[in-house]
Amino acid sequence: MVTAEILSPTHSRSESHVDRYLRVRANSLQICDPLEIEDYVVQSMPDCSPAKWHLAHTSWFFEHFVLKPHAPHYRLFNDAFGYLFNSYYQTVGPMHERPQRGLLTRPSVAEVKRYRAHVDEHMERLLNREDCAERVAELVTLGLNHEEQHQELMFTDLKHLFFNNPLRPVYRSAPAHVTASSSEASRFVSFEGGVFEVGASGKEFCFDNETPRHRVLVEPYALADRLVSNAEYLEFIHDGGYRRPDFWLSDGWSTVSSQGWTRPLYWSEALDTEFTLAGVQALDPASPVCHLSYYEADAYARWAGARLPTEDEWELAAGATPVSGNLLGDIEEATLHPQPASGVSRLRQLYGDVWEWTASPYTAYPGYRAPSGAIGEYNGKFMCNQLVLRGGSCVTPADHVRATYRNFFYPHARWQFMGLRLARNH
């Protein structure tokens, strides 16, 4: 999960703190609308969490970090929930082990929803107090962005859960499909080298791992104008991509060999269908390939005679491009799946569809210092052995991502909507 500290609050000028709080919180419950009660509880692997846990954890966040210290006379809903629904805040106290979240049949889903309603009632009351609203605004904005991160995780965790059910359940029927503008090969767009500034300025909302803004030296480079497609990745497979160690990093080849990988996660053995949130669907050749590990993305790039971009190259190429693309807007209308490239912009699919692996290790920017206290546990302690991804996915809330946003995962992970864009030295 991407996590970090807020530096300055921001929201729509026409939307109050209360309205935004209620909207984001309602979205989490809306994601659960298609679920049966049994779907809320099961955990398919240690990296995933049950939907019920996500609902409770995001409520605990507001209770612990906002209500408990800032709401006069607030009483905890249940003293035990701090242990059950803390995630990794070691300075807060001990917690239930992550791989065993699926064993929490109690509290019930109904009680967790009562917990959410209890927290929301007190949060709304607090935010309507003129003497408190601005004082807690930064924490509330952080909590809402934290909840949006969990909304994305709810989709990816549910997809993994349903995939592991032999019945291959359908979360929701697929909406109308976007038609590709063409099937022509991608082209490379060139960028000049030089010394540039990257990172967030801190003048608007950002996470602490996006700061401080700093200078970088970048050599001339080129980026593909769109994401790598399913058809292109199929060529890699048919050319023995998963059988030829010369394309792979040593750790990648060890992982492929030990895990028996022969194709992207969710693809059928026949390579003609893939599992989606709309159930099993025919593999669309024009759609972006997704659910790739870093190892697979890097191997494909080598096979293609290219490489993965660095995160600095990606951010500089994105520049001041407005955030627009196949992201999670209205939940009822969302595609919940990567779509073919369309349009005639210089760089297509910069935002949405799939998170784009970069070649950059997830480390601190020059001058970075982790915030003090429990909030400081968001980022600093995770800056080891992970790689940066950029751009957001089809299940990333549309108001949540920006050019400086840094996602990060371990190189073997692939249950998230992850894909790639090729880069070359110019």
Image: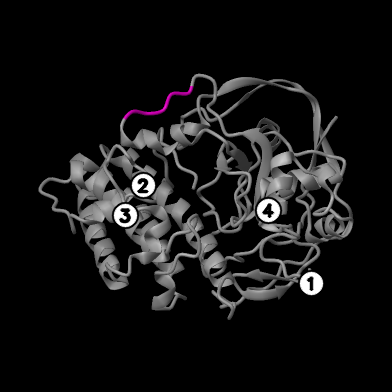
Residue where numbered disc 2 is placed: 143
Separation of residues labelled 1 and 2 (CA atoms) = 43 Å
Residue bounds of the magenta highlight: 368-372
The answer to whether residue 42 is above or below residue 202 is below
Point out the tag, 2 or 3, that comes first from the N-terminus: 3
**The residue positioned farthest toward the left in the image shown:** 73
| The image quarter in which residue 310 lies | top right
Q: Is residue 14 visible?
A: no
Residue where numbered disc 4 is placed: 258
**The residue positioned farthest toward the bottom in the image shown:** 167
Separation of residues labelled 2 and 3 (CA atoms) = 15 Å
Point out the tag, 1 or 4, that comes first from the N-terminus: 4
The answer to whether residue 338 is above or below residue 134 is below
Separation of residues labelled 1 and 4 (CA atoms) = 21 Å
Q: Secondary structure at mark 3?
A: helix
| The image quarter in which residue 268 lies | bottom right
Q: Amino acid at mark 2?
A: Gly
Point out the tag, 3 or 1, that comes first from the N-terminus: 3
Separation of residues labelled 2 and 4 (CA atoms) = 39 Å
